[in-house]
Image (spheres, rainbow, N blue to C red):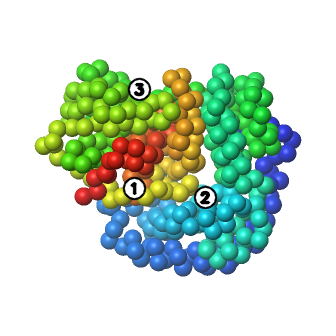
Amino acid sequence: MKRQRVLAVTAASAIATALTLGTAGTPASAEILDAKAAEARAELTGKVAPGLVEELADTFGITESEAYDRLAVEAVAADLLEEVPDSIEDSYAGLWIAEDADEIFVATTDASDTNELRAEGATPVLVEHDLAALEAAASTLDRLAVDGHFGHYIDLAANTLVIEAADVEAADAVVAASGVDPALITVETGADAPEPYYVRGGDAYIVENSWRCSVGFAVRRGSTPGFVTAGHCGSAGDQVTSGQAAPGTFQASVFPGSDRAWVAVGASEPLYNQVNMYSGTRYVYNANQAAVGSSICRSGSTTGWHCGTVQAFNQTVYYAEGTVRGLTRTNVCAEPGDSGGSFITGNSAQGMTSGGSGNCSSGGTTYFQPIGPALSAWSLTLVTS
């Protein structure tokens, strides 16, 4: 995949400034982060799901002790993700975890924010564009439909809005039609066109005796039991006729626009706060959102259990069937039939598999529909016990 700036002004100069600032603040920030992480690690004792530490160690090539350290830093990042955007307001440009999970970066357009950020244990990064400006540009692109435009997302670390396109010509057409300042944009070309992970037949659940998808998470609406899944897996009224999941009926479904649905099952069917890891089970205790850079795992009926990291929030994807907004981007692999399956960080439900590109042999990009909009839109309660 080839990435390039639309203008000669490149991300390199901004990143150099950011790293200079970040390095200057690292010692004080590191001490505070270490203290917060130590507290978070102590709270994790006895609460980490069986097998989770081993999974993280295998996925990231780290020791079990380092896996605990990573979980602790991710917990601190989740707290800062709630607090920092309101604290520095208009200058906020995003938060992410370092690749080695030993630092939490917070980008800002105002150098006067740096002391406050260091005091929170974050490494400040001075950038040119605030997050609101990038999100506004992304919103403008949401209204476009250009052949060869596969989607777009905000790369926090590069402080840019990335357009994914089949080629430079398609990307140029998007930029020209949008009227967005090219200085905000980076273009990625050469990616495969994303597509929903439609079904091939098999286990998990079968819709109308015809196609297969995967269960997301067990939910209830009042006293009615059911589960959430991907919207492209079925329309309201479609029947879940067989498979590992209990038979039921799609009650509501949104696709495109979003990619969410919920299925009601029989009143006597048992619901479990578990995700099938295909080598055991993972318990679900809440739906706390994980920060960009956090570890995340996915379960699906085609490829089973795979892990990676969260790369970006609010990805817009242009499937052939229509535009889907508000997805979360990951580097976890997936394949057709994994659609609707669970994305989970630790014991926190994150969302349901939507689609992507690549496969689990060569790797790829997968997007998921965050679970929150489904729960709130349809007054659903996540099963956590």
Label 1 packing within 10 angstroms: few (<14), some (14-19), many (20+): some
Badge number at residue 257: none
Q: Residue 353: horizontal and vertical position, in percent? A: 43, 39
User: Which residue occupies 31% across, 51% down?
Assistant: 381
Dot 2 and dot 3 residues touching (CB under 8 Å): no
Badge number at residue 96: 2
Examine the image and state in which quarter residue 211 appears.
Answer: top left
Q: Residue 184: horizontal and vertical position, in percent? A: 76, 44
- Mark 1 residue type: Ala
Q: Mark 1 or mark 3, which is nearer the start of the sequence?
A: 3
Answer with left or right where residue 190 lies relative to residue 60. Answer: right
Pointer 1 residue: 287
Viewer-nearest of discs 2 and 1 = 1
Report helix, strand or loop for mark 2.
strand
- Mark 3 residue type: Tyr
Report helix, strand or loop for mark 1.
loop
Label 3 packing within 10 angstroms: few (<14), some (14-19), many (20+): some
Viewer-nearest of discs 3 and 1 = 1
> Residue reaching furthest left?
268
- Mark 2 residue type: Trp
Q: Residue 62: horizontal and vertical position, in percent? A: 49, 61
User: Which residue occupies 81% across, 60% down?
Assistant: 17
Report helix, strand or loop for mark 3.
loop
Name above or below for residue 65 compared with residue 191.
Answer: below
Residue 262 or residue 205, whichever sits in front = 262
Pointer 3 residue: 198
